[in-house]
Image: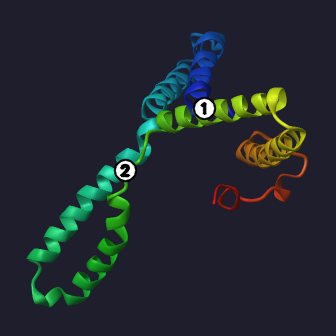
Amino acid sequence: MVPGFALRIQSMIRAMREVVIPAIPKDQRLALDQANILVGNLRIMAEQHDWIVQYELTELREYAALLADLIAAASEGAAEAIAEGRAVLAQAEPVAATAMPTQQDLTMLVRDLKAAADALVQAAHRDGPPEFRRTATDLVMRQAEAQILRERRWLRAAGFELDPASLPSLDELLA
């Protein structure tokens, strides 16, 4: 299981506040100021990380509305810009209509799916026929293999992979 952004950010803030900042000599004002700026930015990230997509969707909707209003008010002399604007609006409209869950909503739903799958696998091994137990084991192992590969790639930047270039891209793994 990959720790979520909220937990990682809180861990970084705690490390900065409890270990790093106290270790900086008081006469090193620039270092202290920079460390506190880092803590402030981490706090902002902790507050905002779950809202990034919603923020972008809000801007998308507002600018789509602005562009639609501008196109409606535009004169015929701006035909090329109007056509380009309409093309961009055609791309934006389906995205703007999308209702996006928060990261927390998704995390809770994934947790519930994992718990339901776990309960079914336990029931299969407790009460199920041998063929279902084998099938359940095979399905879980296949999913675990994909999960492990995805998590290895997700955390590649930490520097623990022996051959990081051999891992598929996030685009491939998250498609």
Q: What element carries label 1?
A: helix
The amino acid at mark 2 is Ala
- Residue 21 image position (x, y, % from top left): 60, 15
Is residue 25 visible in the rendered image? The answer is: yes
Mark 1 → mark 2, Cα distance in angstroms: 21 Å
Q: Whole-percent x and y of residue 81? A: 25, 83
Q: Quadrant of residue 32?
A: top right
Q: Which of 159 and 98 is in front in this view?
A: 98
Instruction: Reply above or below: 165 against 114.
Output: below
Tell me what residue is drawn at x 88 percent, y 42 percent: 134
- 10 Å crowding of disc 1: few (<14), some (14-19), many (20+): few
Question: Where is residue 48 shown, x and y percent of the image?
Answer: 43, 35
The kind of residue on which mark 1 rests is Arg
What numbered label is drawn on residue 99? 2
Relative to 160, say whether 153 is above or below: below
Q: Do the residues labelled 1 and 2 touch (CB within 8 Å)?
A: no
Label placed on residue 140: none
Residue sitting at x 70%, y 56%: 173
Q: Residues within 10 Å of mark 2 (few under 14, many from 20)?
A: few
Vertical order, 23 against 125 (above or below)? above
What's the mark number on residue 111? Answer: 1
Q: Quadrant of residue 132?
A: top right
Element under label 2?
loop
